[in-house]
Image: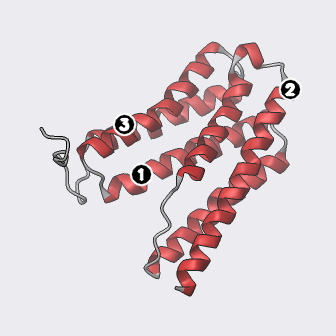
Amino acid sequence: MSASAAPVRRFGPGAIATPANAVTAIRLLLAVPTLVLVVKVGASWSTFVMWTVLACTDGVDGWLARRDGTTRSGAFLDPLADKFLVVGGFLALAVRGDFGWVPVVLVVGRELSISTYRSLAARRGISLPARQLGKWKTFLQLCAVGAVLFPPTADATALQATVLWVAVTLTIVSALDILFRGWQETRA
């Protein structure tokens, strides 16, 4: 294949049964027992490994989607899996007392409100896709949970708090970015 040839897409936008969607569905299914482990066990190697596998497979389903063709179902399911995992992890650690409720409310509130905002904007024909800032936000949110679950850093509360508040700050900044882009699109 020449360097200028476009990759062959195996799936069209309406496809549902794709490898990327299968990975996303598995992520959603495995999130439940993983979150139960987070609540019941907290920091342990088994919990950390499960969390890390779920966090890393986000990149796998994205890679598969880019390789095989993105779909509307994948565009819905992938962010849903991310939100479920992040919100679930933050809430599980708050229930355990590992995270304070203020940062958790900020993150959960942002995720719910921005998802609602994007849906309402889409109804008006405004598309607000994730940008690199949102990907970094999700990565840092997953790292904040991972820092608590990783046995060598389980007692490093200063490190955990630093990662948590950096994630919260980026969460708020990315929300403001989306709101600003939506405002610009509305004015255009």
* Distance of label 3 from label 2 (alpha carbons): 33 Å
Please name the residue that numbered disc 3 is placed on. Answer: 23
Location of mark 2 (residue): 157
Cβ–Cβ below 8 Å for labels 2 and 1? no
- Front residue of 14/183: it is 183
Quarter occupied by residue 40 = top right
- Count residues near mark 1 (Cα–Cα under 10 Å), then give few for <14, some for 14-19, many for 20+: some
Asked if the residue under mark 2 is in contact with the one under mark 3, i.e. CB atoms within 8 Å, the reply is no
- In the image, what residue occupies the spot 20% across and 56% down? 12
- The image position of residue 128, as x and y in percent, is 50, 67
Q: Residues within 10 Å of mark 2 (few under 14, many from 20)?
A: some
Up/down of 120 relative to 133, above or below: below
Q: Which residue is mark 1?
A: 77
Element at label 3: helix
Residue situated furthest right in the rendering: 158
* Amino acid at circle 2: Thr
| Color encoding of the figure | secondary structure
- Amino acid type, callout 1: Leu
Residue 97 appears in view: no
Q: Is residue 12 visible?
A: yes
